[in-house]
Image (cartoon, rainbow, N blue to C red):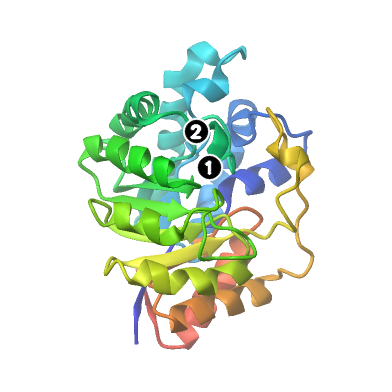
Amino acid sequence: MTVITLLDGGLGQELVHRAGTQPTPLWSTQVMLDRPDLVLAAHQDFFASGARIAVANTYALHPDRLKGTEYESRYDELFDTALALAEAARDKRGSGRIAGSIGPLVASYRPDLHPTDAIAIPLYQQVAARFVERCDLIICETVASVDHARSALSGAAVSGLPVWLAFTVDDEDGSRLRSGEPLQEAVSIAMAGADAVLVNCSAPEAIPASLPILQSSSLPFGAYANAFEQITNDFLKDKPTVDALTKRRDMSPEAYATHVLSWVDQGATIVGGCCEVGPDHIAEIARRLEAAGHTII
């Protein structure tokens, strides 16, 4: 059958749930500051569930996210902590890869706030350089516009590591980015240097329309969706907290795995989960993939 790369699930939301405290605008970074043991445990649980890649807790580690907080001067320390925790989980497992995550500058799902290339590219380069010699690849996540795709890919390229671009698409029209621009335009940019193209942090139902567009790149492609009810207006405000988002009650491990297996049937070879997709979901995906005769790497 097919060789499938299985990513982990949504680390940020998993950490917020495990912490059991009121979310802050710093999201999973705050949990890592308060309870680094929870980050290690989450990585270990995702590996135990069948994931082969741990995505480091670096999604929100941008200077602009920390600016104005008491942690602004601890940027270097936070990066080292996030990578060390992923490395510790991999070493304890005895196998696996680590992906450095580069999230959007300023805010998720807000392509209108994304800086110009002149500002964004050096910032992405600054992050990407930190992954050299400590990560196997970089995933630029939740890419919401064509400009975002261009600057993230250009910035990540400084690392010399394989770069995967993961786009977030309209939850009702998977052929379009959240900016409203055609996904095809961003995929065309990816073809100039990315090593894989994916869709992430979008409704599972939107993914099938995205996959033929990703496949047109001739690059390895796939998806890892979220399990939010919707991206609310409150979450699109300045300095939002994740309690403005609601977890879907219908997205059980079995239901989510059914979506994932259908993407594999469409040709996807990289799958996993984003926000509100936990270790139980990944375990069910692994079980179903193996039952169908696929090889997981």
- Tell me the quarter of the image containing the N terminus: bottom left
- Tell me the quarter of the image containing the C terminus: bottom left
Residue tagged by mark 1?
Answer: 40
Quadrant in which residue 131 is drawn: top left
Q: Is residue 65 above or below residue 70?
A: below
Q: Secondary structure at mark 2?
A: loop
* Label number found at residue 114: 2
What percent of the width, then of the height, locates residue 31?
64, 33
In this rendering, would 136 be left or right of 76?
left
Q: Nearer the viewer, mark 2 or mark 1?
A: 2
Residue at position x 28%, y 65% in the image: 219
* Label number found at residue 143: none
How far is the residue under mark 2 from the one under mark 1? Answer: 31 Å
In this rendering, would 80 be left or right of 228?
left
In this rendering, would 199 be left or right of 251?
left
Quadrant in which residue 83 is drawn: top left
Front one among 187 and 80: 187
Q: Secondary structure at mark 1?
A: helix
Amino acid beneath label 2: His
Q: Is residue 91 visible?
A: no
What percent of the width, then of the height, locates residue 117?
36, 31
Q: Earlier in the sequence, mark 2 or mark 1?
A: 1
Q: How many marks?
A: 2
Residue at position x 31%, y 54% in the image: 190
Amino acid beneath label 1: Leu
Front one among 183 and 131: 183
Q: Residues within 10 Å of mark 2 (few under 14, many from 20)?
A: many
Front one among 142 and 8: 142
Residue at position x 24%, y 37% in the image: 159
What percent of the width, then of the height, locates residue 127?
37, 30
Q: Is residue 227 visible?
A: yes
Residue at position x 58%, y 76% in the image: 259
